[in-house]
Amino acid sequence: MRFLLLYATQKGQAKAIAEEIWEQAGARGLEADMHCISEMDKYNLETEKDPVVIVISTTGTGDPPDTARKFVKKIQDTTLPPDHFAHLQYGLLGLGDSEYTFFCNGGKTVDRRLQELGAQHFYDTGLADDCVGLELVVDPWIDGLWLALKEAFLLQKEKEGMSSVVNAVSSSLSAALHGVHELNLSSEVQNLKLEDEGVRNSDVLSQKLVDINLVASTRDTEPSLVHSIPSVSQSALNIPALPPEYIEVLGKNQTQGTTFEVPVTKAVQLTREDAIKTALLLELDIADTVFDYQPGDAFCVICPNNVNEVEELLQILGLSEKGEHFICVKVKQGTKKRGAARPQHIPERSTLKFILTWCLEIRAIPKKAFLRALVECTSDVGEKRRLQELCSRQGASDYTRFIRDSNVCLLDLLHAFPSCKPSLNLLIEHLPKLQARSYSVSSSNLYQPGKLWFVFNIVEFPACPARPVSRKGVCTGWLAELVAPLLHPNKNTLNTEGGSSSTEKISIFARPNNTFHLPADPSVPFMMVGPGTGISPFIGFLQHRQKLREEHADWEFGETWLFFGCRHQDRDYLFKDELRCFLENGTLTHLKVCFSRDFSTAEVAQPKYVQDIIRLYAKEVARVLLKERGYFYVCGDKKHMADGVSDAVVDILSMEMEADKLEAMKILATLREAKRYLQDVWS
């Protein structure tokens, strides 16, 4: 029994889930014909008679992944008739993150369009949320897929008029499903030792029940990363199948688009030393490049992993002396992994240290498949059992609490489980590509040609029970160290020419933003909401507007509003002097600020957060958005700010229009669609 399995992935999640489905299908005697959705020469939905399963992720902007662009463009052809896919039956699993506005929009877009073209669901759509853990939806969705496929196959045979074979198909499918179920529960499987070679190479099961007596007794009453408590410690465990090995390690990383190596010409600490977060502004010299940007654009910085962490990892792996050795990375002959290929981000030949420094995200939160593979590299019985628990269904809440929510990385795990000694090929197989980090541009090329500013907080991951040492963000920690000799903790140096002779350079590439730009018509009013480093793109907006006002005295310019907030007026009020200048010369019409940690002696409670100030100017917000067709920009933290701002805007629209909340939400949705309510947010 064959079905078509398509995946569209951005960072590899959807592909990994599709591979899991492919492996489970094989164990059930089914043939999953698996392809990336971009490989349109290898499948044809127009003539596809078998059921189709689609796994599709969503980018941060809510679009389908890059690999699905061609496919989406094809199915969105408006000349296609409404019965174009009437023959098609499909099941779709969408991946997303509810931290972002357009949750699972990649999957929803494809799902909606297939429905419009007459395709039928043979199985309910699943929407998995990376914010709480994809597996909470993915695992049960895959479990239910097999029965739904069985019914789809039967329906398919009935349609083909082959009623004589329906019973035979039904009984064989039932036997396959029943057989796996029986095997899952059998005491023989329950007592299999995972290190037995037979199980290691087995593709029969996707979950295996493990001997519960492996665990060493513990008196701990509270669970932790390394200890469990009943019921987990006394459960038989459903753990994932061991992913087949496919990389063999024997004996400059490419990045997307054009990369520019540019000098850092200035670094300024925008916050006082006693501020809770440290914000830095860096100036890059792009004069000798063809790099171009608009205010509101983002760009990416290519950064390495922390040099000390790389050394520590080499030491644990027992490879300290071999860091500079050249190694060759190849696909293992005879691997059982479907479509195994050398990861594109790993050079075929390079030094071990280069791979760990520039290619692999060693700080990535380990996926359950990685934990499952680490079980095989762990010699201590108690540690082995705990790793099994953490990747099992029974240990799902422990995985979320002690690994996912604690931001645990591979190094933390290797410290917590000292008998775990993974091979280098395992790291290359399971650690994702080291991603370039994206930042908003904080300047205007019109205002200061050949210069690019950007602002960031130095990210801190404090020590916790699961992580004995505090760590800085991969990129922000590296940048802070890089520019330390240039740093001036003084806002007043912003407008002075830096006299430093620093020759530090960083590599960047463009990531243009198609929407988060100034209105094309300068007479249109706009409001900006940017607390903390969320103010970054708006400095670029205001620099650009100031230059336009100087160059075009005869133009009409709309009013500009900025809502800014920080903790303390005297510690982390970013760009305070610059904003005062913009206000004095008329570039900025209204500046409204709040300070969440400064205690006011005023009788009337002062607004703490930007969403509180916005409510104080309800009539103005409604006027700009509704009467004057203005723009509204929000930049900064999503969960704690952007959602609060959109709630405030909904309340304002509801109140000013005397409409119910649902109607106001629809109006806000219309403003988003019209690209007049725009967000540049992060979680």
Image: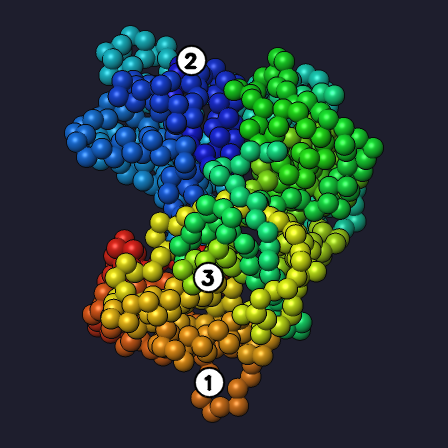
**Which residue shows up at 47% across the image and 38% down it?**
257
Q: Which mark is residue 283?
A: none
Secondary structure type for disc 2: helix
Vertical relation: 340 (above or below) 144: above
Residue furthest top as drawn? 164
Q: Which of pointers 1 and 2 lies earlier in the amino acid sequence?
A: 2
Q: Which mark is residue 605?
A: 1
Label 3 SS: loop
Q: Earlier in the sequence, mark 2 or mark 3?
A: 2
Res 681 visible:
yes
Residue visible at 30% across and 64% down in the picture: 631
Amino acid tagged 2: Ser
Q: Are marks 2 and 3 in contact (CB under 8 Å)?
A: no
Instruction: Please give the name of the residue rendered at 23% of the width and 11% of the height, measured from the top-left corner.
Output: 161
Taking depth in this image into account, of 468 and 392 the one nearest to the observer is 468
The secondary structure type at the circle numbered 1 is loop
Q: Which mark is residue 448?
A: 3
Please name which of the two marks, 1 or 2, marks the residue nearer to the observer.
Answer: 1
Label 2 and label 3: CA atoms lie apart by 72 Å
Mark 2, residue position: 172
Q: How is the image coloured?
A: rainbow
Which is nearer the eye, 239 or 631? 631
Q: Position of residue 376 (x, y in %)?
A: 72, 28
Viewer-side label of 1, 3: 3
Residue at horizontal 53 percent and vertical 90 percent from the top: 601
Task: Return the disc, 1 or 3, that comes first in the chain's sequence.
Answer: 3
Q: Measuring from the top left, give residue 510's x and y in whole percent.
A: 46, 46
Q: Residues within 10 Å of mark 3 (few under 14, many from 20)?
A: few
Answer above or below: position of 50 versus 93: above
Q: Where residue 17 sits in the image (x, y, percent)?
A: 50, 31
